[in-house]
Amino acid sequence: MEKYLLGIDVGSTSVKAVLFDTKGNVISSASAHNEREQTSDRIHGFEIFNVENVWKSTYTCVNETIEKSKIESNRIAALSVCSFGNGVVILDKNGNPADKGAFSQDYRANHIIEQYKKEGKLDKINEIIKGTLFAGEPAPILRWYKENEPEIYNNIGSVLMCKDYIIYKLTGALSADVNCFGGSAMLDLETRNYSKELMHLYGIDEMYYCLPKLLESYEVAGTVTSDASKLTSLAQGTPVVSGMMDILAGLVGAGAADEGIVTIIAGTWCINEIQSHKIIPGASANQPALGKNLYLNCSYTGASAVNYEWFAKALGGTAIMESKVRSMSKFDILNELVATVSPNEAQVLFHPFVAQPSVHPNARASFFNIDQNTSYAEMAYAVMEGVVFLHKKHIDFLKNAGHKITLGRLTGGGARSSVWAQMFADVLKIPIEVVDCQEVSALGAAINAGVGTGVYSDYNDGFAKAIRIKSTFASSEKYADAYYKRYKEWEYLIDCMSEHWNYRQ
């Protein structure tokens, strides 16, 4: 009897449940929007969500996915969960949400980072975590609670990532995985374990005793309980594998574990990552990866294709009207418009900084060089190109750190546009491949579930059986000079804007 694997991807914009067969074919899926809480505190950096609503969206999506599949739920061999890293979900001493969850773009704790600098602690923290601490990570947010909401802080019983809360609701087990916690600056990367010294440097010593059981990504965290079975339609006793941060799940779902392959996630975040045996100084993060001597070298900021979504929402009237007339997606219309613009003639540049963390704590998105002759198509082009330039900035960092990058695997919303994929290939000067699955992180979670329960002998076995390349985009030199000049001006404008961003502090 054929078995199936369920991947659950809890992102900062949506929750997705996708059922796969063991060959990586999608059997059924469902998704729900992950709503941001609308609050006046957003001006102070709050990016929050209702934790219980995320669980409700999750079990609703799982239920719908199983119903659509028309298969018996006992044929699901296992499931695994990935989610955005960083941010935080806190439970009280009774195991209930103690407050709203925080997204990774939450920057209420910017001043905490400055405080660590003034106290002379930040360099030591970064040395222990082997990354670059930012305000949206769990520890600074917890320090913010200690200073601003002591009643909530003193009643914290457990500190979790978003995916860990979903696993807790599915199994009743309080657990975390090494990848997601390590990538969220909560572990000593040399020991791959919790550290009292690190909690002391953060100024949250008492939180050491609120940290959950630590597992490898492929270990079984627990099994589906009777209560969760009733809500999800999953069979009671189904193994739930610990899982990983969505960016590692993206690498797994893209089959990009070999050195020389950069996984480019053009989604909510601008993620650029390579698995290797080394730790890179100054990286955004060096996460524990798919083995005890492997690291995920990451260079990232908090906004990629979401810039394009913002553009389509805020300034997309022309594309929306055209899409209605032609019965097409507004993004297909925008792709057509972008394709009409030549880099040799384009003047407008765009800084794709609609969310934090970014190149500067106060960086914001901007258009440059607009005049009365600027077309709507050129503005759409500038947004798409600006996102590619931001990825290039991060990939250049990985190259300068010693990585010889020969291939890119593109995932996220950017991978759905052939125009965008070709631009990545031309700007980065490497071939770009897109895998034959739109929900790559969910596929990565499903492969992880298979590895954790013996459906696959290891990750390479999962890659071989479940991953196929859909499209390859070769790099062209046609616009190489234009892209070079435009990128240099784009970088120069970041330097120019830094003085203004400093003024806003």
Image: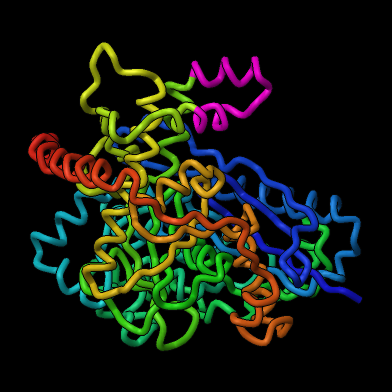
> Is 500 one of the magenta-colored residues?
no
Q: Position of residue 165 (x, y in %)?
A: 57, 61
Give the left or right position of residue 37, taking residue 376 as reference. right
Q: Position of residue 11 (x, y in %)?
A: 54, 51
In the foreground, 69 or 462: 462
Q: Would residue 217 be visible to someone looking at this image? A: yes
Quarter of the rendering occupied by the C terminus: top left
Q: Position of residue 382 (x, y in %)?
A: 34, 33
For the residue pair 200 and 505, the one nearer the viewer reads as 505
The span picked out in magenta is 317-336
Asked if residue 360 lies left or right of residue 64, the reply is left
Q: Residue at x 71, y 66 (%)?
A: 24
Q: Residue at x 23, y 16 (%)?
A: 371
105 left or right of 440 in image = left
Image quadrant assignment for residue 272 = bottom left
Is residue 168 something one can see in this rendering? no
Number of callouts: 0
Q: Is residue 451 above or below residue 416?
A: below
